[in-house]
Amino acid sequence: MEFRVKDVSLADQGKRRIDWAEAHMPVLVSLKKKYGQTQPLKGIRVAGCLHVTKETGVLVRTLKAAGAEISWCGCNPLSTQDDVAASLAVHEGIAVFASRGVSTKEYYDDIHSAMSLNPHVTIDDGADLTVEMHKALDKNGIAGPIYGGTEETTTGVVRLRAMQKAGRLFYPIMAVNDAETKHDFDNVYGTGQSALDGIVRATNVLLSGKNVVVAGYGHVGKGIARRAAGMGSNVIVTEVDPIAALKAKLDGFSVSTMSEASAVGDIFITATGCKDVIVAED
C-alpha cells in the first residue's frame, strides 16, 4: 500500500488523538457500528480530499468499517496534522498523501496520487479534487467508474455550480454545505469558534476591547461576529450585499466599508470566499 506522509514515527501519537476524537463523535461511532456488520460500501473506492485532522480520521475509520477502499489527501497544506496522517497510513492501512507545509506542486501531486485509486466516489472540501478529476476526465473522455461526489464548503459549491452552468460538470455532486446542519450549525457555531481559537492560539492576543473587522456576513461571518462580540470585541462588519449588511446592523454590529474599517481595525477576518477583499491602497 502506497502512502506519503511526513513522519511515520508519529503514528502512535496520531492514533491517540483519533481515539480521543472518536470518543466525542457519537454519530459516526454509531454509523461505524451499524455498517461495520453489513459493509454496504464493500467494493466501492472512495477518494477524499479534506483537512487531515483527528476528526476526519474518525470519518476515515467509519468509511473503512463500512467496507470502502480509501485514498486520502489534504485539502489545505496548512491544516494537515502529520501525526494523524501517519496513523491513518500505519494503523488503518489507508493510502494517504498529506503533509503539513507542502508546496503547491506537492499539494497537487498528493491530489493526483489520491486520484490514482480510480475512485467511484469523491469527498471534497474546496473542489480541488473534483476539478482535477474533471481535468482527467477531459483528457480520457467522460466514461469511467465515477458515480458521484460530495462538496463540503460554500467556496467549493460555488466553483462546481459554475462548472455545472457551463456544462462542464460530468458527474453529480451532493452539496453538503446546503444541508441545514452544515450551514446553520457547523458554519455559524463551529467555524465561528474555531476561527477565533486559531487567532488566539497563533497570536495570544486579548480580544476584549479590540476592534475586530469581519468581512462578510453570511453564516460564517455571522458566527465569527457573534463569538468575537461575546469575547468583548468591538465588531465592525463589512458587506457588499445590502440585505446581509442590514442583518448585521439589526444584530447590533457596526457596518462600514473596508476602506473606513481599515483605519480603525485591530484584527481583520475575511469570511467571503473571495480574494482581494483586503488590498493595498495608495
Image (cartoon, rainbow, N blue to C red):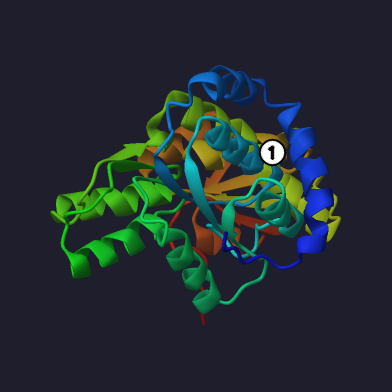
Visible residue check, residue 25: yes
230 over 129 or under it: above or below = above
* Position in image of residue 163 (x %, y %): 22, 55
The answer to whether any part of residue 187 appears in the image is no
As drawn, the residue found furthest toward the left would be 167
Which image quarter: residue 37?
Answer: top right
8 to the left or right of 117:
right
**Residue at coordinates 47% horizontally, 66% vertically from top-left?**
113
Foreground residue among 165 and 49 = 49
Whether 162 is drawn above or below 153: the answer is below
Residue at image point 65% right, 57% down: 79
User: Is residue 257 or residue 197 the one in the foreground?
Assistant: 197
* Residue 225 in the image, given as x and y percentages of width and height: 62, 40
Q: Residues within 10 Å of mark 1 (few under 14, many from 20)?
A: some
Residue shown at 57% from the left, 59% from the top: 1
Helix, strand or loop at label 1? It is helix
Q: Is residue 250 above or below residue 161?
A: above
Q: What residue would you read off at disc 1?
A: 193
Residue nearest the observer in this picture, 81 or 70: 70
Q: Position of residue 215 (x, y in %)?
A: 53, 52
Q: Nearer the viewer, residue 44 or 125?
A: 44
Q: Is residue 18 left or right of residue 29?
A: right
Give x and y (percent) for residue 188: 57, 33
How many marks overall? Answer: 1
Give the quarter of the image for residue 58: top right
Quarter where residue 78 is shown: bottom right
Identity of the amino acid at label 1? Gln
> Does residue 195 appear to the left or right of 151 in the view shown?
right
